[in-house]
Each structure stands twice: as C-alpha cells, then as structure tokens.
Amino acid sequence: MTLSKERIGALFFLVVSIAYGYFAAEIKLYPGDELDPMTAQTLPYVLSAMGITFSLFLLINGNHKEFGSGFAHLNWKPVIALMLLTLFYGFSLDWLGFLISTTVFLIAGFRILGEKRIKVLLLVAVPFVFIFWFGLTQLLDIYLAPGRIFGS
Amino acid sequence: MLDGIITGLQTALLPTNLMMVVLGCFVGTFIGMLPGLGPVSAIALMIPITYGIDPASGIILMAGVYYGAIFGGSTSSILINAPGCSGTVVTAFDGYPLAAKGQAGKALALAAYASFAGGTISAIFLLLAAPTLAKVSLSFQSADYFALMVLGLSAVAAFSGKGQVVKALIMTVFGLMLSTVGTDRATGVERFTFGSIDLLDGISFLLLAMATFALAEAMMSVLERVDEGAETQDMTKLGSMKLSKEEIKEVAPTVARSSVLGFLVGVLPGAGATIAAFLAYGVDRNLAKGDKKDEFGTGSLRGLAAPEAANNAASSGSFVPLLTLGIPGSGTTAIMLGALISYGIQPGPRLFVDHPEVFWSVIISMYVGNVVLLILNLPLIPYISRLLIIPKPILVPMILLFSITGVYLVSFNSMDILIMAGICALAIFLRLLTFPMAPLLLGFILGGMMEDNLRRALLINDDSLSFLWERPITLTIMLITLLILVAPLFQKAIKRFFHIESNAESLTID
C-alpha cells in the first residue's frame, strides 16, 4: 500500500477522529443530563463516527498514485523561519511591547524573505510601525499595554 | 418592499457607506490581484476594521471587498495569467491570450463590462427574490433549519469536484469538531478544553479564518514560490480600452445568458463563483459555431465575457441564502456570516424584519459596488497594478502582520498568536495534501447553530427523529440532500448514458 497524499491525510484524520471520540467520552455531564435526548456528548460522538467512516473510506478508496513531486522542492526554509518568527512575536508582544516587537517582526520578516539592504529594512519598518501605532493608539484610542520589561 | 428599498438607499448612499464601498473595492482589487490571496483572505483581513463601525457599514465594506477581490483576480488572470482566486481561473483561458496579443486594455474593459452586466442583472434578481424567500422562510422551524444546514454542508462537499468529495466531507466534519470546542451553549458543560482557560469560549472564528486563509495563503505563496515574473512590462502597455459596436453585439447575448446562469448557480448552496464561471464558459463554447468555437482558448471575447459575467452574478446570488436563510453557500459568505454574528446580527428570515436597513443596504450597495468597479477601478487599473511592484519580501511580512494583529487587537491575548501559528501550520499541511479549506470554515460556523436547532427540534418533537420526515418541507430538503450526496456515485453512469463531456472536473470551492 503506497502512501499517497490522500492517504496521509486520511490517516491523520483517522487518528484525529479516534482521539476526538476518546475525549468526547471524557466530557463531564451534569447528573440527569443523560436522560435528555441530546447531551453535550451526542454530537461529538456522531462527528467522531462520521470522521472515522470518511477517513477509512478515503484510506481504502483513495488515490493510489505515488507521492507525486513530494514536498522537498518547496521553499521550506523561509516558511519555517516565518513560523518561528510568528511564535516569537507572540511571546515578545507581552514582554517588549507593541512598538519594539512589531519593528523586530517586520525587519526580521523582510530579512528572511531576502531583503538585505539595511536602509530599506529600517526605512520601511520603522515609519510603518510608528504610523500603525499612532493610528491605533491616538486615532482609534486603543490601549496597547507597554512591555513587561519596562515595568508597569 | 418599496419602503425597504428606500431605507436601503438611504443607508447605502450615506457618505460614509459610499466611502466604504469605494474603499472596499480598492482594497479588494489590490488583494485580489496578489496571486495566491483570494476573496476569503481579503475579507478576513477586513473584519477587525469593521468591528469599530456599525454593522451595515461593515457588511457593505466586506461586500465591496468581495467584488473588488474577484475583479482584482480577473485582472491578474488577464495580465499575468496568475488567477488571484479560483473564481477567475477560467478568465485566464481567453483573457491572457488576448493580453498576449497586445489587447490587454480591451480584455480588461470587456471583463469589467461583463462583470458589471452580470452584477446588475443579478442585483435585480436579488432584489426580487430575496424578500419573497425571506417571507417564505419565516415559516421555517428548527427542524427545517437543521435540514437546510445539513443540505448546505453536503452541497459544499458534493460540488467540490472530482476526487474531492470525500476530502471535503472530512474537512466539514473537522470544522464541526472544532466548533464543539469550548463551553456547550445549551448545558454549560466544558468540552475539549483540556483545562485551558483560553479555550473556554471556544476557538474564535476570526482566528480560525485568519489562520487558515490569510496567514496560510501568504505562507503558501512563499512556500510555492508563486511566479511574479513578467508582470511589470505588461502593466504599462495596456492598449486601447475601447470595444467596437460589432464586438459588443457579439458578446451581449453571452453576457445575458451567463448572468442568469451565474445567478442561479450562485443561489445554490455550495456552488459558487468558480462553478458558475466554468459552467458559463462550457455552455458558451458549446453554443458557439464554426470559427467562433475554435477561437475559445486563443483569445475569444465571448470566452472572456462568459465567465466574468457568471462569476460576478454568482457572487451576488450567493447572498440570497446568506441573507434570507442565514446559511452560507461558500467560504466567502461563510466568513461574512461569521462577521455578522459577531456584530450581534443573526442573518436569516428575522434579518429582514429586525434589521431591514442591513438587509436592503447590502443589496443596494452591491449595485453601487458594481458601479464603482466600472467607473473608478477600471481606469485606475494601471495605477493599482503598480502597487504589485512592491517586492514580495516587503509585502508578505506586512500581510502576516495584518493577519496577526487583526486577531490580537480584538482579544489582546498573545496566546491567540501562538494558537494561530499552530493552526496555520496545520492548514499548510492540509493544503499541501490538497484538502480544501472552505468546508472547514463552513462547518465551523454552522456547527453551533446546527446543534442548537437539532436539540430544539428533538425537544419539540418528544425526543424522536421523526421530524426529519414528518413535515413536507423538511422531508423535501432531506431528500435533496440525499440526492446531492448520491448523485456523484451515479455520475459516471449518467455521463455514459448522455455522452456528456464534463469540463468542470477539477474544480475547487472559492
């Protein structure tokens, strides 16, 4: 049995559906709920069963073709870097505040995608972030908490 | 109805709302022109902005973005043979050859005129059909709504093209699964929260839409190195934008036919602009005779006008089920439904009664949007397209930033950014495995409503599922659902019987 793209997806959803069904059994009900025609567990059980059925169907009947061109030719490096950058942004927003972390995010993002001129990096990111920040805080009156490292 | 139209006119023609249409069309055109980013992403990016304004203006802005995005998609189809969204894939078949012949201006103008005509015809239909349907749907009960939602979800899967039906069904179920995360609305029980406070309220719709569309599409454009080669040279030399009388005479019947067809396809749940465009193109090619038939694919004016009129008509048509029943038929209308719900407006038959200004102003502003596209956007295309010269290394991080801050500035919870990154990674994985994303969003948005309606129907009906076949309306809807789901199984047999060649085999939903 060859692993085609469809089958990988089918396997993935089979696992997800089984896990979903397992955790559906763990949903705690209030006493007496089980007498209702439909409890908080009913729909999850049905969905889990449907998910398992469909993914088994796809696993068996799915495309038998080879893996195709695979994923190796894709441009993975910058995408992984951008994902990590997004995670970093999520952490840094609380600590460094909006201005610094957003500027860092943009400059690093431009750099990852191949813009190397420092002048361009700074001249685009800094004014952009400042205008964005100004618009949010001054024009739209949105409160942006300062970073924790500045104490507040 | 006249009262309603006047209310709608008053709201839609307010200076702020006119500005929203213009702004929406521009932004939509720009985002739509970026290869890889479709209308769903364009609308998702707009949602955080609309939170600050009143619902009517918000939905008007989003409708403007929708048209703009489809128009922008046609522009990049014609100029650089890189459709901005799936609804305009067919436009490239004849639009790009025309541009290659040095008639880019003519192709763009024809696309705009055809879209305008398609939009106009279907706006009139919408004006007539929507209130009637809204009145009928006032008599709908929970059971009917449940059945309609099942129909909508099945239809999206069934129309998703050859080899995609099961995948779309799986994605729908996955979306429904995601919708059950959080506190159960009826009993107050926690489900799948794993003790996390961030999940108590469930997954935010905006977060899911941004992560699976805007963020994921921007990342995919980096991953797949979408070609942005020869665009700059073509943009400056558009050629004449004039059409001769003979040419207009040639395409007029095509436009009329395709508009009606497009509207009807758009009204069907699940079949959106993409299918409408493919169908209209196919129909017109089959109707063409002799030389005209051979022209298709090499720069036929009819081949360009047909899908353009149809996809625009279908976009308006897809608002019918959204506005009257509250059931979206495509990814794009699903995201609008999500936005409306977060404004505290529940689309459906009550919308027509409770918020007539929203109902009518959307319809009127659709028409205004079409006018804006024709008189403002078309002449400005050379300038808007210059924005595409902004290099990708600058553009992509900006789009990422807008999608992330769009979510963050609503919740102010940095945990959301981490969840977004996780969902985005999953979305990229699934996109690479060619699983469609629109059914996921649709399932997620309809999940809660579906469960509520099912629960209510069961309560009313003494815990018995017999409501599914006892009322004629419910029974009819369920039978249609069954038919739609079973039809693909017999497709081969039917085709063999009628010797039909399908040219809409590899469609994806927009």
Image (cartoon, coloured by chain):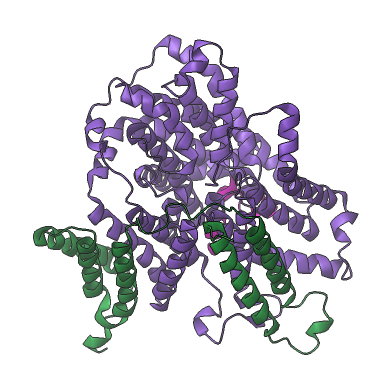
Q: Which residues are magenta?
A: B337-359
**Would you say B262 lies left or right of A56 here?**
left
Q: Nearer the viewer, residue B157 or B244?
A: B157
The x and y percentages for residue B114 are 47, 26
Q: Which chain is green?
A: A
Question: Residue at the location (48% across, 57% down)?
Answer: B431
The x and y percentages for residue B139 are 79, 51
Question: Residue at the location (51% across, 84% down)?
Answer: B197
**Residue B130, relative to residue B303: is it above or below?**
below
Chain B image colour: purple
Quadrant into which the N terminus of chain B falls: top right
Q: Nearer the viewer, residue B372 or B196?
A: B196
**Would you say B361 lies left or right of A95 here?**
right
The x and y percentages for residue A67 are 48, 56
Question: Residue at the location (60% across, 56% down)?
Answer: B167
**Would you say B443 lies left or right of B312 here?**
right
Numbered marks: total: 0
Question: Residue at the location (51% across, 54% down)?
Answer: A66
**Residue B243, relative to residue B276: is it above or below?**
above
Q: Is residue A144 visible?
A: no
Q: Nearer the viewer, residue B53 or A44?
A: A44
**Residue B387, relative to residue B348: is it above or below?**
above
The x and y percentages for residue B154 are 69, 52
**Residue B492, relative to residue B411: is it above or below?**
above
Most extreme residue toward the left, as rendered? A119
For residue A57, which quarter of the picture?
bottom right
> Does residue B470 show up magenta in the picture?
no
Q: Nearer the viewer, residue B428 or B13?
A: B428
**Would you say B85 lies left or right of B458 here?**
left
> Does residue B348 show up magenta in the picture?
yes
Q: Is residue B213 visible?
A: yes
